[in-house]
Image (spheres, helix red, strand yellow):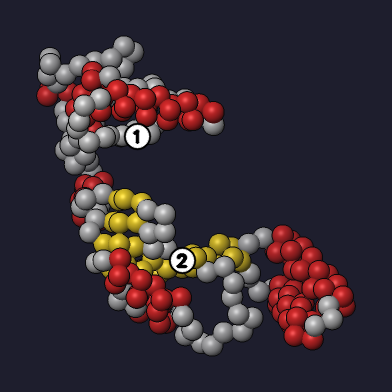
Amino acid sequence: REPMILLKIWKPLGPGADLALLDRAALLIDRLSNNQVAAALMDDKQIKHLCTIYAELGIWQEAETDAADIPYLKNMKRMFSRKPTPQEQARIELLEQVTPVGGIFFEPSEFMVGGAWCRCYGVVRYASEVDYNWAARLSNATDCITCYTYYPGRASEIGDALSRSIRSSNRDALEETDARRRKRSERKAKDADRLIDDLDAKSKALGHMSIVVMPFGDSKEELEEICRDVVT
């Protein structure tokens, strides 16, 4: 079986670097095994085999191009592809254009795509009422990419969730002594009650909305400025 995921690890060239690299690989294999993930070191023959097949992702190879010096592994056959259809060729060209030059590198709070520093924010709380065109500023921003995804929901599941929310909010409102927090719970119950009315009486379609915003900049300093603007 060919590997599903390839992990490349390296260390700067120096005395004992090869042994340190093997120790690091052994530690990685051990930790993956503890999480029920099978892993093993690849030898030069396996690496050359995979590079021969996958290195030229945009080039289709015919069976007659087979070369005798290409290594074959036990029980492994080389995959030869037919010529792509015009639709498949267009998709290949699109993937080649959108693939970031330089790869993707991750850090604790940001990541680099090609030459741009990026960070992703997900919207986790919405106002009970929003103005028309409320997301236009995010959508039209030139220094960030905004993705809106709508997931249709089942009426029965959404209705049950709203009913639980009403019961919980009403209970919190009765037990709350702080006027501000009590009003907040009452508004939450009222909003859920309105949604149930829309769902049952007006047969409106309800679902889940996901919003992810990815600001980006040429440097970390520029990224921080853009992120402050996005959050506020």
Find residue 230 and name its label: none
Amino acid type of disc 2? Tyr
Residue found 29% across the figure and 56% down from its top: 113
Taking the spot 31% from the left edge, 28% from the top edge, the residue there is 21
Q: Who's the residue at 60% across and 80% down the image?
A: 127
- Say which mark, if any, is on residue 121: 2
Instruction: Work out whether 214 lies above or below 10.
Output: below
| Crowding near the residue tagged with mark 2, few <14, some 14–19, many ≥20 C-alpha atoms within 10 Å | some
* 156 vs 122, nearest the viewer: 122
State the residue in front, 113 or 30.
30
**Quarter assignment of residue 228:** bottom left
Q: Is residue 29 left or right of 76 when viewed as pictured?
A: right
Residue 186 at least partly seen? no
The amino acid type of the residue labelled 1 equals: Leu
- 231 horizontally vs 166: left or right: left
Q: Which residue is mark 1?
A: 7
Q: Residue at left 38%, top 59%?
A: 110
Element at badge 1? loop
Query: Dot 2: what SS?
Result: strand
Is residue 88 visible to the viewer in this orientation of the structure?
A: yes
> Residue 132, position in %: x, y?
51, 87
Q: Is residue 215 above or below residue 68?
A: below
In the rendered view, would you say 74 is above or below 98?
above
Q: Quadrant of the N terminus?
A: top left
Residue nearer the viewer, 24 or 153:
24
